[in-house]
Amino acid sequence: QVQLVESGGGVARPGGSLTLSCTASGVALDEYAVGWFRRAPGKEREGVSCISYQNSRTKYVDSVKGRFTISRDGSKTTVYLQMNNLQPEDPAVYYCATDLSYPHHYSDYLCGDDFPGLDFGSWGPGTQVTVSS
């Protein structure tokens, strides 16, 4: 059974940077898509970014394009979200997720143009990101 754990959250100044990590156990994460999501207080959960198998697709919500970068480092267990130029609208609990029903190139469906149109089945507990001067 897959388990995901996010790390790297914390406090950054406006304009600052943080790098979030999503580490998996029980699965070779490089065979699946991984999505990053966030939920701010009083708001609905929002899809932030997605990366599919072999990095064939990457998606970003418009509000983070040019500031956030999703990536893998070649390991089978970790996906990163590099967040630069953090803004007052970015604070939230950030979650990573995957879905084992869409392996390999089927993972493109999860990171399609309608991301996050499909449900992700496995989620981490989340990590808090705060932006404060």
Image: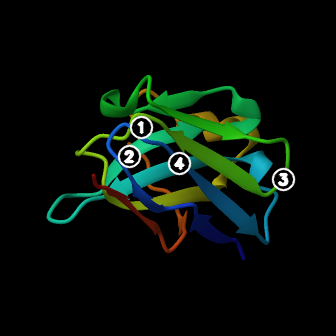
- Residues at discs 1 and 2 in contact (Cβ within 8 Å): yes
Q: Which amino acid does label 1 sit on?
A: Phe
Mark 3 vs mark 4, CA separation in Å: 15 Å
Residue contact at pointers 4 and 1, CB within 8 angstroms: yes
Question: Helix, strand or loop at disc 4?
Answer: strand
As drawn, the residue found furthest toward the top would be 66
Q: Position of residue 99 (x, y in %)?
A: 60, 57
Label 1, label 3: how far apart the Cα atoms are: 23 Å
Write the residue at 66% across / 38% down. Answer: 71
Q: What residue type is labelled 3?
A: Lys
Q: Residue 51 carries which label?
A: none
State the image quarter where residue 124 is shown. bottom right
Residue 6 in which image quadrant: bottom right
Q: Which residue is drawn at 27% across and 52% down?
A: 133
- Residue positioned 38% across, 46% down in the render: 47
Q: Residues within 10 Å of mark 1 (few under 14, many from 20)?
A: some
Q: How far apart in space, not on screen, are marks 3 and 2 (Cα)?
A: 23 Å
Give the labeled residue for mark 2. Answer: 47
Give the structural element (helix, strand or loop) at label 1.
loop
Residue 35 numbered mark, or none:
4
Q: Can residue 83 be seen in this view?
A: yes
Q: Give the residue at mark 1.
A: 115
Front residue of 96/133: it is 133
Label 1, label 2: how far apart the Cα atoms are: 7 Å
What residue does disc 3 label?
76
Say what amino acid the circle numbered 2 marks: Gly
Q: Do the residues labelled 3 and 4 touch (CB within 8 Å)?
A: no
Alpha-carbon distance for marks 4 and 2? 7 Å
Asked whether disc 4 touches disc 2, contact meaning CB atoms under 8 Å apart, the reply is: yes
